[in-house]
Image (spheres, grey):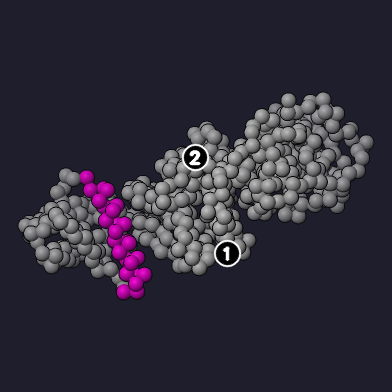
Amino acid sequence: MSTGLHMKPVVVEAATTLLTEMNAATGSLTYAALLTDDGFDVARFPAKTDGARFAGMASSMQALGDAVTHELSIGDSEYIIIASGKGHVVQLRVPGQELVLSALFDNDATVGHALAVTRSFAQKMADLLA
Amino acid sequence: MAEHVILFTGPMGAGKTTAIQSLSEIEVVRTEANNSERHVVDKATTTVALDYGEILVGAQEKVRLYGIPGQKRFNFMWTILKKRAKGMVLLVNSDAPDPLGEMTFFLNEFRELYDRGGVVIGITRSDVVDGPGVADFAEALERTNPGLVIPVFTVDPRLRHQMQNLLLTLVVNIEMRAAFGLAAARPA
Amino acid sequence: MAIDVDQVAREQPPAPGEFPVTVGWTQAAMAARSVLALNTPLNLRMIIESHEPLLIDFRHHAFSWSTPLEDFPVDAVHTHLETVPTSPDAPPFFELPGQDLDGLLWEMGINAFGGEPAFWLSPGERYRLTRWPNLTQHSHNLRQVQMIAVLGNAYASTAELAAYAGVEVSEAQRLINALSLMRILTRSAEAPAATMAPQTAAAKRGSLFARLRKRLGR
């Protein structure tokens, strides 16, 4: 059980670096955050933004996504997408950790690309913490 | 389908999720995550979006029970859930660091539910710890909100009978306040 | 004036040894009421047939009795009632915390006076609640909850209360007596009758309270 990941400097530093790399890997990232299951902001890109509120909301959304898939008996939620005119949010769990990666891409990126990038970096985070 | 929405509010650890489980006829929809701040509140899990339960009153009538996440960083959920409700059960645990302050805080935060419906207050875990008693809560209520005559009961949220009493007291209060023209009716 | 001091003084319990045996709680309620209303430094000791003594420590708002309130003897035979003087620095009447006095006052108030007005109340009054009793601690029924909800939101006379709640006047009176003894009722001779909003269509369908009660089997 991972508790207080947002309070472990080693984890925060690794997460911050990872998100910087994620930004470098794709031209369309506007905002990204790693947050705990219970809504604490671990790291974000750009680093200087106040990510506390978004972290809370993203965790609520993750939990509601799980509640919906369980209600419909379709297993676990794999990813959540929120699409808007100015960009789309892609969100999924970091495998094996109580962490969520949530990222906002501009509409230059296809949803497929955004999903692939997010999945890839969620796995990298999992590998870092394993 | 006639629907009546009751909101369960109060700080983390007061027993909101438990209370809804005691009352609900359906399996409660929960949104729990592991608590990564055990040093702040010693609970294994915490609600991060909402709890949801139901009581089916008749074929065409339902009471919907929503529980807020108690931690303030989820107050955007409070805004969403406040709008739907006609009344509130405010639960406060006697062993919170500042139970009287929590009561006042949530009463103010959700004041519109009193204004357009009604509120009852349940003090939980009063048998577990030598915290403030019902008289202290009533006195704090009178001091911070003079003129508000709100039921304050000690309750064990695990006990269905006690939670039903609290809920029925809320419902009768909402109806009496409406009957005497005291609640500002929300536009349909 | 709400309290007739002369009348209350005349109603002081007799000295020990001269106590007329009484059945029921009227005398006990009067004694408790006197002490509470006059805020005199007194404790009460009551001897009741077939029960251990009942002790009341008003300063600590507590009572001590081996009989649980769930088994409250409505037709108790009181063989003795005495006041025991105390002072602010005197030790408690019994080992604290004892039980919350409100629970006893509720039972005494409900059961004293046989459904008639308590002797300290005046005709032509209306009543309003100042604070809810902690009903988890008191045996109660849902008609009483309804009546308390009326009083929490409006001034009502006993007759008006009975009408609003659809109960017998005597049942409303018992509740008024109890709430008054617990000192959580405001009394007013001047407050006008409350007006209920005109019956809406929803109200005509019957109340959610009634339907929810039925559903919960209460």
Name the chief secondary structure element in magenta.
helix
- Asked whether A24 or C27 is in front, the reply is C27
Assign a secondary structure to mark 1.
helix
Q: Is residue A68 rendered to the left or right of residue C51?
A: left
Q: How many marks?
A: 2
Question: Residue at (80%, 36%) from the top-left corner?
Answer: C119
Disc 1 residue crowd, few under 14, some 14–19, many 20+, Cα 10 Å: few
On the question of residue A78 being in view, the answer is yes
Question: Residue at (27%, 56%) from the top-left corner?
Answer: A58
Which portion, as a residue range, is magenta? A50-74
Q: Position of residue C27 (x, y in %)?
A: 83, 39
Question: Residue at (25%, 69%) from the top-left corner?
Answer: A78
**Foreground: disc 2 or disc 1:** 1
Question: Dividing the image into 4 quarters, which one contains the N terminus of chain C?
Answer: top right
Q: Is residue A20 rendered to the left or right of residue A5?
A: left
The stretch drawn in magenta includes residue C5: no
Name the residue tied to disc 2: B100
A13 above or below B115? below
| Residue B125 circle label | none
In the image, what residue type sits under mark 2?
Leu
In the image, what residue type sits under mark 1?
Arg
Assign a secondary structure to mark 2.
helix
The stretch drawn in magenta includes residue A55: yes
